[in-house]
Amino acid sequence: MPILIVALCILLLVLLITWGKINPFLAFLATSMLAGILLGIPLAHIAQSVQKGIGDTLGSLVIIIALGAMLGKLVAESGAAQKIADVMMSLFGARYIQWGLMCTGFIIGIPLFYSVGFVLMIPLIFSVVYQYRLPAVYIGLPMLASLSVAHGFLPPHPSPAALVAQFGANMGLTLVYGLIIAIPTIIIAGPIFARTLTGIRSASLDTFVSEAIPADQLPGTANSFLTALLPVVLLALTTLLRYVFQTSPALTGVATFVSEPATVMLISVTVATLTLGLKQGRSMKQVMRTYEEAAKDVAMILLIIAGAGAFKQVLADSGISQEIAVQLQRLSLHPLVLAWLIAAIIRVCLGSATVAGLTAAGIIAPLAAQQQVDPNLMVLSIGAGSLMFSHVNDPGFWMFKEYFSLSLPDTIRSWSMMESIVSVVGLAGVLLLTNFV
């Protein structure tokens, strides 16, 4: 019965947004309240669940998205995005630009948190799209598939790293196995799948649209790349320093502070203000006006993501994930497949890849130990399952929809299917590796 209630609430949410034309944030709030009542959460606690979901979701994203939008808008308006697009097009050509973006996304996705990488890559995707008149979803999806795979499969991302600790796996070996599975997964879910999406039309936020600037007025190549990718450089460098200076608590503390996504983004925006703002002849007032416009552009995105967080929290507080897991545990399946299935169904019901992964791990851990399943492969199997079919209860779904200005059906057809392909191909890769390890 609870699973049926969840399905009906998701259907209601979709109908409110598509048929009723209700603002997604308001639809999320109404559906979250109704779901809490129907799932038996005490009335006095429903509002608390909604507030906690909004707070937890925005607490980790609002700084990143707001500062990312500011950085992206300045990169676009200064001509740095145009310069980056020119350089990438000269390296890969229009025919292979997808592969160039995919490789960039994978390299960047290893050290970056998913939401940070997503926000940072959007301006780069649309700079290529606008300058060379290419379909946005067709160009952008391979890069975002790379980020998604890194987020779900590869330590030191939060979910895989937590799963490594929970199963007593080897971090290095899990990373190696993850890379072996990740590469074919990205190719299938990225460039190959994207060929079916060339007919989808999208329009970016005005944040990432800028007038073409004459070549002699563009920032330098090094300035453009280093400023736009400074967050990546800082995260990679501080991660390395934390390992190098493990014996020095003071230096490790500094590196840890700087490596926080909020700190990284603030430093990057400060540097961009100088390199792409003041040094390019803009006044501080002009740069700040650019930042204000960027913040306005993403305000509704933040509210929609907050609404998705509220819905996710209500479902989590109802205990539905545990009920699903207990029911599935009775199935007679290979532990790796069972772990994937539990994570996948919890992901579809709750929307959070991290919650799905950690919940599945808690349920399957005793069985995995009993049957002596390779812990490294168990981490990857659960990671693949936790990415299954992202839809309306996942903040990432709404980030993709709003940034690319897509309809719900087109978002499901592109984003949700891409995530599903990543999940299924990831499981296939895990099962294939069982023959060799």
Image (cartoon, rainbow, N blue to C red):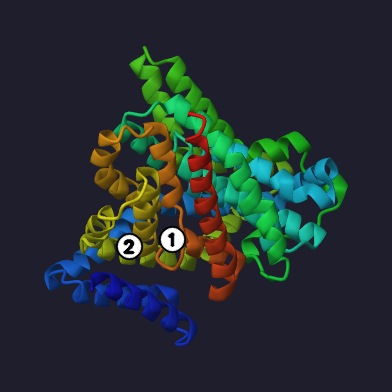
On screen, residue 311 versus residue 41, left or right, reads right
C-beta proximity under 8 Å, tags 1 and 2: yes
At which x and y percent is residue 348? 39, 62
Could one spot residue 38 in this view of the protein? yes
Asked which quadrant contains residue 311, the reply is bottom left
* Residue 312 numbered tag: 2
Residue nearer the viewer, 338 or 305: 338
Count neighbours of disc 1 (C-alpha within 10 A) and say few if under 14, some if 14 to 19, many if 20 or more: many
* Residue depicted at x 25% and y 35%: 370
Disc 1 marks which residue?
A: 395
On screen, residue 428 versus residue 336, left or right, reads right
Give the CA separation, mark 1 to mark 2. Answer: 9 Å
* Residue 297 numbered tag: none
Numbered disc 1: secondary structure: helix
Above or below 253: residue 83: below
Asked which quadrant contains residue 109, the reply is top right
At which x and y percent is residue 212? 81, 58
* Residue depicted at x 46% and y 45%: 152
In the image, farthest residue toward the top: 247
* Residue depicted at x 57% and y 58%: 418
Above or below 264: residue 254: above
Residue nearer the viewer, 180 or 254: 180
Numbered disc 2: secondary structure: helix
User: Label 2 sits on what residue type?
Assistant: Lys
Residue nearer the viewer, 172 or 22: 172
User: Label 1 sits on what residue type?
Assistant: Pro
Could one spot residue 281 in this view of the protein? no
At which x and y percent is residue 75? 67, 49
